[in-house]
Amino acid sequence: MTPGQKFRQAVAAEKPLQVIGAINAYTARMAEATGFKALYLSGGGVAANSLGMPDLGISTLEDVLTDVRRITEVTSLPLLVDIDTGWGGAFNIARTIRSMIKAGAAAVHIEDQVSSKRCGHRPGKEVVEQAEMVDRIKSAVDARHDPGFIIMARTDALQMEGLDAAIERAVAYVEAGADMIFAEAVTEPPQYKKFKAAVKVPILANITEFGHTPLFTTEELRSAEVDIVLYCCGAYRAMNAAALKVYQTIRAEGTQKSVVPLMQTRADLYKYLGYYAYEQKLDELFAHGKK
């Protein structure tokens, strides 16, 4: 079964499917051990955590592919990847799709912002004309050599153009070949219902902290006919807050004693890494050297 087929199967099996953000290979392992059935790599997360830069269209295809490969090498879960606007014109988008499939991704979402994009929950966003985004999707679909691979279209038009226009865009994106729809910065559950009724394909709700979308529960989103719930950034935000607290404490107190309770234990680290299995393999391979 291909990664794309796994993702489609997960969407069909879990209503709604919880897709959890994993910013690196180790967090992907923890997410899988926790029971999640699909993972997500955030473009903003790559920019912030791998590059130390803001989410303003600065990162490149290769920056994201590096993290995709590391994650897909250590987990069997299907991975949804944020490819921003596709990193260029038709041929760039085609290269992006082929590269993501080769790297083991299950799905991507491509958005209708201008190439100098912004975070979906920031002011000042701009979207391209509907026809330009349709061309982006057609380029992605044409480049897809794995029929199971998922091309999801994200629209950021709700804030600027209103609900009806955003839905009209989503319908056009599906007609162009998009398999699923990601409606960004939705503020009310009934809006999801209207998207779903119009597009008639699976829809995704991005439940991100500190943004325009309230922290709806899975039950609320199930009632709104949402198929996929994305938790893009919560884990790395918590990780970063804890790291900052540790840095500040050590600098101020000259010891980490008071923040040790914040830390993952060595035993837990080894558990999620499968460390002991590696040691056991070393013992099996080199037992002849032991006395």
Image: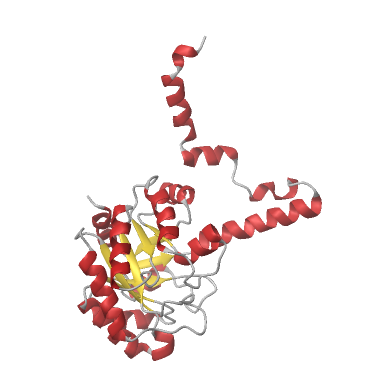
How many dots with numbers?
Answer: 0
Colour scheme shown: secondary structure
Residue 231 image-quadrant placement: bottom left
Q: Is residue 33 above or below residue 149?
A: above
- The residue lying at 23 percent from left, 56 percent from top is 5
Which residue in the rendered view is the most extreme toward the top? Answer: 291
Where residue 120 sits: x, y (%)? 46, 76
Residue 68 image-quadrant placement: bottom left
- The residue lying at 21 percent from left, 59 percent from top is 148
Judge by depth and name the residue closer to the eye, 239 or 58: 58
Where residue 88 sits: x, y (%)? 36, 72
Q: Is residue 197 above or below residue 227?
A: below
Query: In the rendered image, is residue 178 in sight?
Result: no
**Horizontal placement of 55 versus 127: left or right?**
right
Query: In the rendered image, is residue 161 in sight?
Result: yes
Judge by depth and name the residue closer to the eye, 17 or 240: 240
Where residue 53 sits: x, y (%)? 56, 66
Q: Is residue 282 above or below residue 245?
A: above
**Horizontal placement of 13 versus 38: left or right?**
left
Which residue in the rendered view is the most extreme toward the right? Answer: 253
- The residue lying at 38 percent from left, 46 percent from top is 73
Where residue 133 sits: x, y (%)? 31, 79
Q: Is residue 267 above or below residue 132?
A: above
